[in-house]
Amino acid sequence: MSSEAYRAGGLAATRTGSLRDSLAAVGGSYYWELRKLVAQKRSWIGLAAAAIVELVFLISIEISKVTPNDGPYADPMGQGLRHSGLALTPVVLKEIAYFGPAIIAALVAGDIVANEDGGGTLKTILVRSVRRGEILAAKALALFTYVIVALVVFAVTGIVAGTIAWGFHPLANISGTRISAALALALTFAAIAVYAVPTIAIASFGLFLSVVTRQSVAAVVGTIFYALALEGLAALPAIKGARPYILVTQLHAWHGPFQTPTNWTIIGHAIWISVLFAAPPLIVAWIVFRRRDVAS
Amino acid sequence: MFDPYYRQPMTQPEGSGRRPVEVRGLVKRYGRVNAVDRVDLTVESGDVYGFLGPNGAGKTTTLRMLLGLIHRDDGSIRVFGRDPAADPVTALAGVAGFIEEPRLYPYLSGRANLELLAALDLGGAGRKEIDEILELVELGDRAGDKVGEYSQGMRQRLGLASCLIRRPRLLLLDEPANGVDPAGIRFLRALLRRLAGEGMTILLSSHLLAEVQEVCNRVAVIDHGRIVHEGALADLETGGSYRLQATDIARAVDALEQLDAVAGLRRELDELTFTLGGDEDTVELTRALADTGVGIRALVREQTTLEDLFFRLTESDADLREAEAAIA
């Protein structure tokens, strides 16, 4: 072994406390958080679920006797089903908007800290050279990455399966304007990007529950319950005026890219409302995580 | 061939001239219970320090506070002169350890676990060093297997490896021999001796008193949150009890009664028991017996073991009676 290989006690001395130093710590931790997600079965189950929902929907349409203007066809973009494979993803997204991605996000978000707390690995990583806040930041980034990857898997599966079944053809958007297949493809990913924003806000609440409850099951169930409770709240006639400011309402902002002209207003609105919903749980989680005793 | 890490010249970080561990008046409360009650500990550089106590005595809680995992309610902790509660990352520079048992990711391989932890050390061990440390802990051939498939002993060894890749100057180990078979214990003992011989300071909490007695130079015994004994193990080996068998017991009694160094002299059948202040006093004793014409058949020092000390300090008479009754 070379002499430079061993620098006893010099490890933490390499921390300068600068922003760059901190970003490097978060970056390194983020990479390993992703590696951990890749190595866990539940991550793949979530991604598989995201893919399967598209396939199940496609098969059910193929074998159903639903006529145009019924069920999913009632959606303006539903008219494109059986005519263009690119209609599949927007239609399925509309059908599962309130609960599907919330479940997938909860599965990982609720577990990402609580699982390590319960398994005792948290105390293993907290005695190294990365600060607690940096570890939580890396976990949050990995969680958000997972949410985005799950949505991309969902979209790509729908596009590929839909194209195989019905072809790569132009279709009418939500405003009824006919758009090219290439544009529809690009807008599908734009819609997924918009949809990811409120989904990440739901995942942020899951992360908060994961930190505070220290119980994976409680955090996963709590996150799903949170999404459902917001949905129930949004349905209350008494607070109709507040509905645009509830997080789950933003799960429909993905319509924006599929409107003519592009509805930037609902996209921008969804972004800032989602940030408002995401920030408090993330801040509280950060404060609790930095301060709390890790005794397990 | 493994080239020992710990013989390399050390780059001394800031605070390296300070004591590895200095704890004063440490208190941790859980509700009304003082889990740790005004504990003072000093671990000097190069010590292999045994930290002993029955279950629930406060050992693990103390170690958790030393590693900055839990907050103290009162007192001070300095690790190489720094407070781990104020800034754990800086205070724990050159410090590694695990609490209760090493917890690693079961769905990652042994090597991947070490790579992960080295990454969290920011500039930690590279692949080559990791491979060498895996060889050192005799896990080289199982490094690619998932930790979930490891035995308890293998996980303990991987836990040690996870500490060594941090290149520590201070190693804090909480029950490192838990669940380890006799061969594993022998391996652990040899490794700790080697690390200590190469200058590493080790704070070791263990139930295996014989092991502690073999590898440690100082011990502290904690009971009900309080330190009830602290000192060098060498102190146990001096000032002990002696048994004497002589050619003429009556004249031997007369001779020993004249010596100031002899205390607690008792006759038991054909032998005498007494205590002496130290090894030098045995010289005076043998001369006195020779001067009176008494021949020595046997002079045996009854060494106080760590186990004797531990149970004397941590068990009440009621505990002893209960244990005897259970055996009966």
Image (cartoon, rainbow, N blue to C red):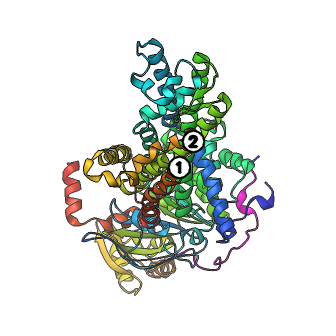
Q: Look at 62% across and 41% down and name the residue there.
A: B139
Which element type, helix, strand or loop, lies under badge 1?
Answer: helix
The residue nearer to you, when weighing A239 against B1, is: A239
Callout 2 touching callout 1 (CB < 8 Å)? yes
* Chain ID, mark 1: A
Question: Residue B322: x and y, percent?
Answer: 20, 56
Whether labels 2 and 1 belong to a single chain: the reply is yes
Placement of A227 over or under A176, stated as above or below = below
Q: Look at 50% across and 66% down and name the residue there.
A: B67
Which element type, helix, strand or loop, lies under badge 2?
Answer: helix
Residue B72 visible in image = yes
* Chain ID, mark 2: A
Magenta: main secondary structure: loop
The Cα–Cα distance between marks 2 and 1, rounded to whole angstroms, is: 8 Å
Placement of B241 over or under B141, stated as above or below = below
Q: Which residues are magenta?
A: B2-21
The residue nearer to you, when weighing A106 against B154, is: A106
Q: Look at 25% across and 51% down and name the residue there.
A: A238
Earlier-in-chain disc, 2 versus 1 = 2
Image side of residue B52 versus residue B6, left or right = left
Q: Which quadrant holds residue A296?
A: bottom left
Residue A257, label in figure? 2
Badge 2 density bin: few <14, some 14–19, many ≥20, Cα 10 Å:
many
Is A61 in the magenta?
Answer: no
Question: Residue B264: x and y, percent?
Answer: 32, 78
Question: Residue A35: x and y, percent?
Answer: 60, 43
Residue A267, label in figure? 1
